Amino acid sequence: MMKTFDIFVIPFVVGMVFVLMFCLAALGRVILQMPHSDRRRLLVSLVTPQTFLRNIRDIFCDCLLHVKIWKRNPVLGFMHSAIAFGWFMIIVIGHIEVFVLQPFNDYNLSFAQDLGSKLYLPIFFRFFSPEAVSPTAKTLAFLMDFFLALILCGILTAFLKKIKSTIVGVKRITKFGFADSVIRIALWTIFPFRLAAETTQLMVFWWLYSLDLCLFMFLLPFTRYMHIPSEMLLILLRNAGIKSKSPRQGFALAEMYSCPGCGLCIDACPMSVDDEKSGMTSVYFIRNLRKNDPEKMREMAEVCLMCGKCVSVCPVAIQSCDLKMNLRKNESENLISDLSYLNKVDISENICEKGEKVLFFAGCMTHLTPRIIKSMKKIFEKAGERYEIMDSEGGICCGRPMLLAGKTDAAQAVIAKNTEMIRKSGARKLVVSCPICYRVFKEEYQLEDIEIQHHSQYIDEIISKGKLKLSRTKSRIVYHDPCELGRPFGIYDEPRHVVESCGVLVEAAQNRNMSVCCGGSLGSITMSKDKRDAVTDSSLANLMANHPDEIATACPLCLKTFAKKTDIQVNDIAELVAENCS
Amino acid sequence: MLDDMNKVVIKGGGAAGLRAASRLKRNGIDTVVIERESTLGGHLAQWDRLFPDGQKAKDVLDRLLSDINGVEVMTNHTITEIQRENDIFKIKLDDNTVIQADAVLDTTGFDIFKAEKKQEYGYGIYDRVITNAELESFFKTGSDRRIDNPKKIGFVHCVGSRDIKVGNTYCSKVCCATALKQACEMREAFPESEVYTFYMDLRMFGKGYEDLYLKAQQDYGVKCVRGRVSEVAEAKDGRLVIKAEDTLLGKPLKMTLDLLVLMCGMERKDGFIATKNGFVEQNITDEKGIFVAGTAIQPMTLPETIANADAAVLDIVEFLKRRK
Amino acid sequence: MNFGFSISPSSHIMMDDVSRKRFDALKKTEPDIAICMSCGSCTATCTAGANAEVSLRRMILMLQRGKDDEALAMASRCLLCGKCYLVCPRGINTRHVLLSISKCLGHDEDI
């Protein structure tokens, strides 16, 4: 008579029960820590057919197939999907085998036995039913072997990656702690043990297989592999439109659990140019969030340049910048602010004309790059635009630097004052030359019927409307994508069009959403000049890859940062246009 | 070539004199160094370390001394009279020796300003007021009864410089960098101490000087206060109460110190020696055959003094050649 | 009681009464605070300074002269725009200095 139970299944069952309970508890914590409005949002999204379908698609593409990683590097993509998709299929087919073949159906099992067997039978099916007799059983057995082989190929790739990471296009890999190293060995050995057990049918391998699974599941909640269950929840929450509001709770907790520790952000992070600082990248930041180490969390949140490249490359799309901002907010929110003097600020001297016009906001940084202001004036005049410069005399900051420093309430006072002044001006369109300002105007200001344009968009628009006649030179110009303009808004093409109409556009080694921060970012609060200089040098090296004659950018801060570290000409796109327009 | 009959007498065996002697020797010119003290080296021999990088003064002096091997040196001698007979100088010494020479190089350098002249700083009145030179000898010897684990130390710049009241309207050039060098050394010697320097302008013009300024602030925590100390009084416990204005805040400032170091400048009893032209004849005096080099002309740093001595040697060689 | 006169507090900065602790704590947080050479570029370019009394140079001096409250009041007017960082010839991390002033002085009353 066939066995329905063997003592070796116990470690697996215990591990499985533990992990299920932990995940349930974690789910409860995430849901309970979210504000009520977010819980409602989640509920609504779950019953909306459109979001429902999107959830299914995203879970399939991101969690199982890892489409994003495939796009990055096919070998790395293969490694991830071989393991994830292979394992998923083994679980699915394992359950189909049990369901279709029903090996225990002839036995009268008690309810408890039946429930237990539901857990372990798909995992140890070959032990209880070693022979595949029917064609169906043979087909299923073949599929199981196929996916097992796929997983083993994936594990082999992972092993090779560990030895030489460049084969998957990765320079630096995450340094793991003890638990993470142990669970990785556990994961890598599960499937070889299974293969050995199924082929030899020796008890020792079945024991090893079960114990290994047990170890894996007990370590899972405390290691990066928590991302396996958590990522699915994260997709649901994200598709419901929920954003993190705290550094460690609710949605943030789901994000923390979902970090697979893959370390793609290490290569992406501009700070990694300085090896000592690569310990400051998002993967380590999130690890410290999980550890709840306040000192380290703060240090990492404050040094970050907020360039957003780690978010861009993150296969799980964890919004680590948001988490850091939440942390900064907690740190700085209650700092004393006295902005009562803003009431005295009056820009009516600058605004004299009534009626339709373009309002130009230079912003703080542009005041230190007066060539941009001069160029914009020329461009407005050549285009026959009625314009006024909002902050030619006086004027205040846009508020974004305060937001970046976590002083959110104080920033609102600045935003309110600027809003009032802009509304009063009667302008229909606001043009800004600084991406830092542009971002806050787009994201935080309530200027419903006023069109906000970055000057790259504005200039591109007037060129395409034929309002500006430009002569093209033969100069090879590389365009640097500013962090605050490219990644958040996808404004990549407009400035390139502008550059192309003035000279020959050359691309940097890494561009668009892979662009490297210039190092001057206001995002970092604590980074010292030396570290910033190292970032600037690496950003410049990236720009110089194709030997351009000059550099163009669309941000006064990038401009100033580059200009002091390079001998080749650095221009704002406005300067290029002003120089080349007739 | 110059013949063996050429002879130059160098008056003063300090840095400029020693350097000039070695260069003249290299040009095959017979040279005698007359030094009034018993040892050579002048002020350099009294110094412990040099700004901006803390090089040992002794190492520099040893090098200068080894370079004059073979040059005739007469220490403990002073020149009492110089007579010119045609183109020959007859130089009479205090022991009635007469040396004949074709040219004379004056490298008699400077005197350190006498701090007693600024009575308001209390030098010689209060025990805890010392001069830069005395502090330097403390660094050299490691002992000075007045320096007893001071907790708060002040340095006053421009003592006897830029001060029309003592007749010195010029800047002594070396005190700013010396003050910061000594301030750092005090922080090293007494890590618990707080060191303040009171300056009118920080004139950190030379190579590495600005770096010294940054290092003093960054690594040694030296605090620079813009404002000249104008008054020093003694508290009951013998400590010093100084008054200055923090001109950057526009407020008067009072402070109790355990030690006050006066950065005494350079001066010469009979004034600095005038040269024919400050640009192109820097080492030539109106008296034919009499040359001058180093801080006898104007305040100079040590590298400047040495370069200036080299330049004087060129002028002397040319002078002797042309005379043939 | 009215004596017909009153004693006004001395306008002197009494350095003997100034505690180093706060400044030293700040220096630990942001070492750049020690390297200001009082050129005044920050004050001249300050966006907030155009409308209110804000001067990083003075704040740093005030902290060294025990005028913590005045420094904190000035820091609270800062808009953190970062122009001062761009103009500082010593490359002082000015925004962090300013935030640290608010953090150290605004919270830790016991220092």
Image (cartoon, coloured by chain):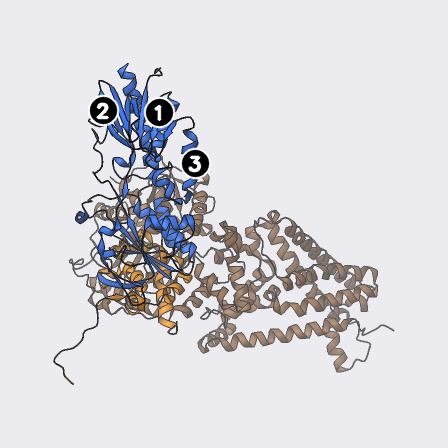
Chain colours: A brown, B blue, C orange
**Mark 2 neighbour density, 10 Å: few (under 14) some (14–19) many (20 or more):** few
| Disc on the earlier residue, 3 or 1 | 1
Residue depicted at 26% across the width and 23% down the height: B90
**Mark 3 neighbour density, 10 Å: few (under 14) some (14–19) many (20 or more):** few
Q: CA distance from mark 2 to mark 1?
A: 18 Å
| Disc on the earlier residue, 2 or 1 | 1
Image coordinates for residue A56, horizontal then vertical, percent: 56, 66
Chain identity of mark 3: B
Type of the residue with mark 1: Thr
In depth, the one of A578 and B287 nearer the eye is B287
Image coordinates for residue A192, horizontal then vertical, percent: 75, 58
From the viewer's perspective, tell me whether residue A370 is left or right of residue A9. left
Residue B62: mark in rendering: 3
From the viewer's perspective, tell me whether residue A164 is left or right of residue A496. right
In this view, the residue farthest toward the left is C4
Tag 2 residue = B83
The image quarter containing residue A407 is bottom left
The image quarter containing residue B250 is bottom left
Residue depicted at 37% across the width and 29% down the height: B73
| Disc on the earlier residue, 3 or 2 | 3
Q: CA distance from mark 3 to mark 1?
A: 19 Å
In depth, the one of A511 and A428 nearer the eye is A511
From the viewer's perspective, tell me whether residue A307 is left or right of residue A96. left
Labels 2 and 1 within one chain: yes
For mark 2, give the secondary structure.
strand
Chain identity of mark 1: B
Type of the residue with mark 2: Gln
Image coordinates for residue A64, horizontal then vertical, percent: 61, 61
Residue A152, relative to residue B97: is it above or below? below
In this view, the residue farthest toward the front is B95
Tag 1 residue = B31
